[in-house]
Image (spheres, rainbow, N blue to C red):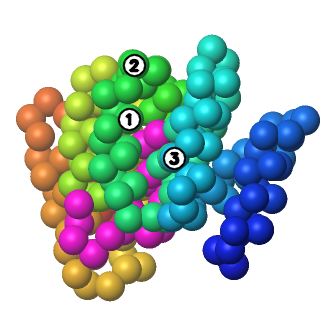
């Protein structure tokens, strides 16, 4: 798929359509999700349609969407937070979508800080619902000191804003304190 030619895309789509196991299907879907090609969107939509009644497979789909390195991934993740299958009340859905986005080295760490701001908003929404899961999402920022000074400042700002929230849970506050220390 890195060759970005018609034959590679054809083979990848064929693997997705004819896979007899989830490993092969997800490998093909992941490759297509990272390719700006006409086959991308139909592949993601068809995968969801096929597996929409299998919650664990839907979690895989959410993760593939959130891990894409293509531009526009943050917008897609935001869109998926309103998808009927996603809810902040289900930890597995949160880990699949937000956790995968927080591990996305390209889009979470986009230079404008939009990925950090989005994650901060989601942590603040999640904290009253499930403090343990919110605390785990804070860990997306754990390595903030390893980035350039601009990204460090952006991440630190989001972390400090979140830590300053009145009524933040003790679970989130504990992780925030450790991450900022």
Tell me where the magenta segment starts and ends, as one range. Answer: 97-114
Q: In the rendered image, which residue does mark 1 sit on?
A: 80
Which quadrant of the figure has residue 70? Answer: bottom left
Residue closest to the far front = 6
Residue 35 percent location from the top left of the image: 57, 64
Which quadrant of the figure has residue 150? Answer: bottom left
Q: Is residue 91 magenta?
A: no
Residue closest to the far right = 20
Question: For the residues marked 1 and 3, what is the alpha-carbon distance in whole angstroms?
Answer: 14 Å
Residue 108's place in the image compared with 90, above or below, is below
Say which element carries label 3.
helix
Say which element carries label 1.
helix
Question: For the residues marked 2 and 1, what is the alpha-carbon distance in whole angstroms?
Answer: 8 Å
Q: What number is the disc on residue 41?
A: 3
Q: Earlier in the sequence, mark 2 or mark 3?
A: 3
Which quarter of the image is occupied by the C terminus? bottom left
Q: Few, some or many C-alpha atoms within 10 Å of disc 2 (few <14, some 14-19, many ≥20)? A: few
Q: In the rendered image, which residue does mark 2 sit on?
A: 84
Residue 76 percent location from the top left of the image: 36, 46
The residue under the point 9% across, 35% down is: 166
Question: For the residues marked 2 and 3, what is the alpha-carbon distance in whole angstroms?
Answer: 18 Å
The residue under the point 67% across, 24% down is: 50
């Amino acid at each position: 798929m890195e060759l970005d030619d018609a034959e590679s895309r054809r083979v990848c789509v064929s693997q997705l359509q004819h896979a007899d196991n989830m490993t092969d299907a997800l490998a093909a879907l992941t490759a297509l999700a990272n390719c700006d090609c006409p086959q991308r969107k139909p592949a993601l939509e068809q995968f969801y349609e096929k597996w929409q009644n299998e919650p664990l497979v839907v979690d895989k789909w959410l993760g593939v969407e959130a891990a894409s390195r293509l531009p526009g991934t943050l917008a897609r993740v935001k869109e998926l937070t309103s998808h009927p299958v996603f809810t902040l009340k289900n930890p597995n859905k949160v880990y699949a979508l937000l956790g995968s986005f927080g591990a996305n080295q390209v889009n979470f760490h986009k230079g404008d800080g939009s990925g950090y701001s989005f994650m901060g908003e989601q942590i603040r929404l999640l904290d009253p619902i499930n403090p343990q899961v919110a605390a785990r999402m804070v860990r997306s920022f754990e390595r903030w000191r390893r980035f350039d000074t601009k990204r460090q400042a952006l991440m630190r700002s989001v972390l400090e804003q979140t830590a300053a929230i009145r009524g933040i849970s003790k679970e989130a506050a504990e992780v925030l304190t450790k991450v900022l220390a």
